[in-house]
Image: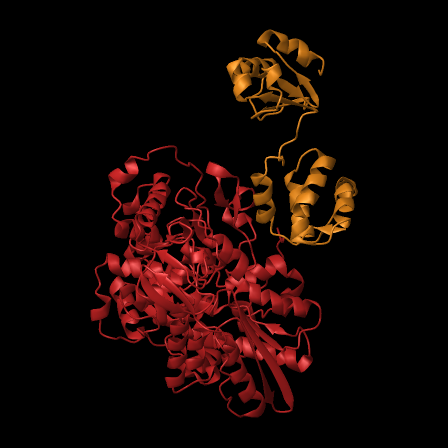
Chain colours: A orange, B red
């Protein structure tokens, strides 16, 4: 396989790109398949590093800036590695009134990262979201698919420790 | 189809179907302001500066993007429309740096003009003071500076790069308040697949995209007594620089241009047309050789540095089809620092070569590592037409009052064949003239290839039928090249110019630019060629002398060393 100006790939690189090639093989070389390809590639690699985006651009016959434009536009796409566990803190009105920001501060302190960042050990990614639709449980957070409601800053370390 | 009846500001008007409200209003003398609209590009409808009121629905619509329909009534002057247009411009200003005085586009800025004509004052904008964008400026070059802080997100550059050039080096990235026009991963211009053509800068309504200026370094060289500063001007400049001084597009001002350059203090004032004749000698003979050997055909021209870089990124497999002949600018500079230095007994180390070019990609070309065959960097500085005009204005030279002067002798003589290098199709016509005469001894009739898009022609030379094609605009070029790649190209000779209309439409030419203006410029250039007595490069007496005294034969040892070059494959992304 050739890529990036005709340089031959090493065996290690070939192995790295193999899942991507599999994804790309299922789609026609057309601009309109960019988003599904990006979604599947992110599913596979956990995030969308530069070399994957470059490869996708060349494979779909797009300019890299076009791919970059799409990736930076949609919040579903990530260019940095993501943690094993995604912590989503609700910042909706009900949670806000009942101290959501204090919960957020406690999580930031506990993990040592800001919102939008990932811990160095790649265990946690912290995000704020507008509303997760569980206002009755405010203030509420989600860790992966599980919901944790009626939180206080004091409860934070215990909940997070389950995922460490 | 019959005409459409509409009412604009209570006036009944009949217009062609498909006309936009903006153009319908223009037909009755109402200029609606706009920023994202550009006559040469697809519709975008994003700036909302051209809104008018549809009196039947009561809606405000973007007049550039709304086609007329039968019975439509709209108002350009209703209070709603007037206030909305004003407010939309004020909002743009609220996130736009207030440094018009120091901006490259002061005086040619479309936003500035609109603000002035709408009568928006500083206090109107101060009311809206809020958060401002702070993004890094890309000014590492080689050709263009991008300042996203000045960008109003009209997207003209994005559309030009995609639709006209097929490059898409620029795109919108991020969203909402953080939206900017940028490159992939915000990389600097030198690290991306940009052809450096500068077409983006010719459509940018503000100062967000401008050339990297080399004016200061040229002044420094002129002011240095130890430097012998030689200037060359590209063929197209004589047909375009007049616009900077109030002349109609296409007015030929060759004599005044030569005079102005002398007033600025250049030691010698030459024309690149001299070396365009030289390029024809080399490239014509190269084409002849390929034709006879049936090798590396179609022969593709290489005098356009935007096209060359595009080919290196996108068609590295076709680089052997490109002529190895250097561009006229580079041939000129290598001869200036060798033959001319020897002839005039000047130390080549003290020679400083400046090229006045219609082009931003030439700034990149001069810095290419391949361009040092004279033993020095062959070309020291490249100024665009716009930069030269600025220097003339800075010195208070009244361009229109200058008496016509001639270019300096020796490297000043040129033929009409060289002049038409300035427009699309010119190189082909010039090269084929020489080839035909050499093979058959008969002169060539005019090919009269058109200015726009892709054109082709077939001509019989001796017992051979030669098919030539020209393309301008890189998206058009790609069509021809895809054929070549598939082995389906019917052509023997292909000329490619990166910019629409060729050099007269170059990224360094006066602003604002449109197809209409470029047509006039190209017609101006063709008119000079028609008037010239000598129209064949191989009959230029100076060129004959140069080969006799110094170079020997075309494609020979010295020519090969000084006048030919190599290309390098670069990644597509």
Residue closest to the eye, B398 or A109 = A109
Please state the horizontal and vertical placement of residue B243, each as a whole percent of the image. Answer: 31, 66
Which image quadrant for residue B69? bottom left
Where B331 falls versus B144 (above or below)?
Answer: below
- For residue B376, say whether it is visible: no
Please state the horizontal and vertical placement of residue B310, each as a whole percent of the image. Answer: 57, 60
Left or right of B385: which side holds B462? right
Where B306 falls versus A93 (above or below)?
Answer: below
**In this view, which residue lies farthest toward the top?**
A154
Where B213 falls versus B561 (above or below)?
Answer: above
Left or right of A37: which side holds B299? left
- For residue B572, say whether it is visible: yes
Left or right of A106: which side holds B273? left
Please state the horizontal and vertical placement of residue B109, each as a whole percent of the image. Answer: 33, 53
At 72% across and 35% down in the image, what residue appears?
A43
Please state the horizontal and vertical placement of residue B295, each as a whole percent of the image. Answer: 68, 75
Residue closest to the eye, A46 or A34 = A34
Q: How many marks?
A: 0
At 70% across and 44% down in the image, what residue appears?
A37
Residue closest to the eye, B81 or B431 = B81
Residue closest to the eye, A131 or B311 = A131
């Amino acid at each position: 396989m050739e890529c990036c100006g005709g340089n031959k790939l090493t065996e290690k690189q070939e192995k790295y790109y193999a899942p991507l090639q599999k994804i790309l093989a299922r789609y026609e070389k057309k601009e309109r398949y960019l988003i599904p390809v990006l979604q599947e590639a992110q599913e596979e690699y956990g995030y969308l590093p530069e070399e994957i985006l470059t490869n996708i651009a060349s494979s779909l016959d797009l300019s890299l800036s076009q791919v970059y434009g799409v990736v930076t536009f949609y919040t579903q796409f990530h260019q940095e590695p993501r943690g094993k566990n995604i912590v989503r803190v609700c910042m909706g009105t009900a949670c806000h009134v009942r101290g959501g920001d204090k919960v957020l501060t406690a999580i930031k302190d506990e993990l040592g990262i800001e919102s939008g960042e990932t811990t160095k050990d790649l265990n946690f990614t912290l995000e704020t979201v507008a509303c997760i639709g569980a206002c009755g449980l405010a203030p509420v957070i989600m860790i992966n698919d599980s919901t944790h409601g009626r939180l206080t800053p004091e409860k934070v370390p215990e909940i997070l420790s389950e995922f460490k | 189809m019959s005409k459409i009846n509409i009412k604009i500001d209570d006036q009944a008007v009949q217009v062609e179907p498909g006309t936009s409200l903006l153009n319908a209003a223009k037909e009755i003398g109402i200029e609606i302001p706009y920023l994202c609209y550009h006559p040469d590009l697809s519709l975008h409808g994003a700036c909302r500066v051209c809104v008018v009121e549809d009196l039947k629905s009561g809606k405000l619509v973007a007049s550039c993007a709304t086609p007329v329909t039968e019975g439509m009534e709209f108002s350009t002057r209703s209070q709603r429309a007037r206030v909305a247009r004003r407010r939309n411009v004020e909002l743009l200003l609220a996130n736009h740096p207030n440094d018009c005085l120091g901006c490259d586009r002061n005086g040619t800025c479309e936003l500035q003009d609109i603000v002035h004509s709408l009568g928006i004052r500083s206090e109107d904008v101060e009311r809206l003071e809020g958060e401002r964008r702070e993004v890094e400026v890309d000014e590492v070059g080689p050709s263009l500076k991008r300042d996203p802080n000045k960008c109003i997100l009209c997207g003209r550059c994005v559309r030009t790069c995609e639709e006209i050039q097929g490059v898409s080096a620029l795109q919108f990235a991020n969203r909402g308040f953080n939206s900017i026009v940028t490159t992939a991963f915000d990389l600097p211009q030198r690290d991306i697949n940009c052809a450096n053509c500068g077409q983006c800068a010719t459509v940018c309504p503000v100062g967000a995209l401008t050339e990297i200026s080399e004016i200061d370094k040229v002044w420094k060289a002129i002011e240095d007594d130890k430097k012998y500063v030689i200037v060359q001007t590209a063929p197209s400049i004589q047909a375009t620089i007049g616009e900077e001084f109030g002349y109609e597009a296409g007015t030929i001002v060759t004599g005044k241009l030569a005079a102005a350059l002398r007033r600025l203090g250049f030691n010698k004032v030459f024309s690149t047309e001299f070396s365009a004749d030289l390029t024809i000698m080399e490239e014509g003979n190269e084409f002849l050789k390929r034709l006879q050997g049936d090798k590396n055909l179609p022969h593709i021209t290489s005098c356009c540095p935007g096209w060359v870089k595009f080919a290196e990124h996108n068609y590295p497999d076709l680089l052997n089809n490109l002529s190895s002949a250097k561009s006229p600018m580079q041939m000129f500079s290598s001869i200036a620092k060798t033959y001319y230095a020897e002839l005039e007994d000047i130390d080549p180390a003290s020679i400083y070569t400046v090229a006045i070019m219609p082009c931003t990609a030439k700034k990149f070309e001069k810095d290419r590592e391949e361009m040092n065959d004279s033993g020095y960097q062959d070309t020291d500085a490249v100024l665009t037409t716009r930069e030269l005009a600025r220097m003339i204005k800075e010195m208070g030279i009244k361009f229109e009052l200058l008496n016509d002067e001639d270019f300096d002798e020796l490297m000043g003589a040129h033929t009409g064949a060289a002049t038409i290098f300035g427009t699309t199709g010119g190189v082909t016509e010039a090269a084929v003239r020489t080839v035909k005469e050499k093979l058959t001894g008969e002169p060539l009739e005019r090919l009269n290839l058109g200015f726009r898009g892709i054109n082709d022609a077939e001509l019989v030379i001796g017992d051979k039928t030669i098919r030539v094609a020209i393309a301008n605009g890189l998206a058009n070029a790609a069509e021809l090249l895809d054929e070549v790649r598939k082995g389906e190209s019917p052509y023997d000779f292909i000329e490619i110019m990166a910019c629409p209309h060729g050099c007269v439409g170059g990224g360094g030419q006066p602003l604002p630019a449109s197809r209409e203006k470029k047509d006039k410029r190209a017609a101006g250039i063709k008119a000079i060629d028609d008037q010239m007595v000598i129209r064949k490069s191989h009959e230029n007496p100076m060129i004959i002398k140069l080969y006799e005294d110094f170079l020997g034969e075309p494609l020979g040892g010295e020519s090969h060393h000084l006048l030919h070059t190599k290309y390098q494959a670069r990644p597509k992304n």
